Image (tube, helix red, strand yellow):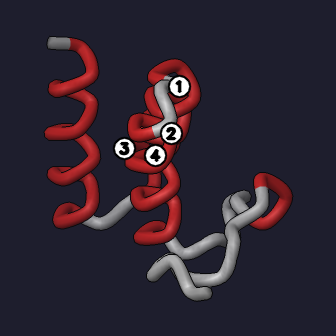
Amino acid sequence: EESGFEPCITSESVGMTAPLEAKYVLAKLYVEIGDPDAARETLAELLEDASVEIRNKAQALMNELNA
């Protein structure tokens, strides 16, 4: 049965070529599964590469993690 998630994102597919929005979703998944370090690493990459809109969302999530 479908869980509502998009097709599985493997770590191999999340490189510089992955859509930045997918990277943000991945960071949120890391938070949900209790891996804040991986989330921070993913967010840090986003903060370097992303558009303003995604960068703002990534920064907000990073702030939550560091709170």
Residue 46 in view, yes or no: no
Is disc 3 in contact with disc 2, using a CB cutoff of under 8 Å? no
Residue with the mark numbered 4: 27
Left or right: where 63 falls relative to 58 = left
Which amino acid, mark 4?
Ala
Q: Nearer the viewer, mark 4 or mark 2?
A: 2
Of residue 62 and residue 5, the one placed in the foreground of this image is 5
Which amino acid, mark 2?
Tyr
| Residue 27, percent from left and from top | 46, 46
Q: Nearer the viewer, mark 3 or mark 2?
A: 2
Is disc 4 in contact with disc 2, using a CB cutoff of under 8 Å? yes
Residue with the mark numbered 3: 47
Looking at the image, is 21 positioned above or below residue 49? Answer: below
Of residue 56 and residue 4, the one placed in the foreground of this image is 4
Is disc 3 in contact with disc 4, using a CB cutoff of under 8 Å? no
Of residue 2 and residue 58, the one placed in the foreground of this image is 2
Q: Which badge, 3 or 2, is on the more N-terminal residue?
A: 2
Residue 33 in view, yes or no: yes
Which amino acid, mark 3?
Leu
Is disc 2 in contact with disc 1, using a CB cutoff of under 8 Å? yes
Q: Nearer the viewer, mark 1 or mark 3?
A: 1
Residue with the mark numbered 1: 35
CA–CA distance between discs 4 and 2?
5 Å
CA–CA distance between discs 1 and 3?
18 Å
Residue with the mark numbered 2: 30
CA–CA distance between discs 2 and 1?
5 Å
Looking at the image, is 39 positioned above or below residue 49? Answer: above
| Residue 65, percent from left and from top | 27, 22
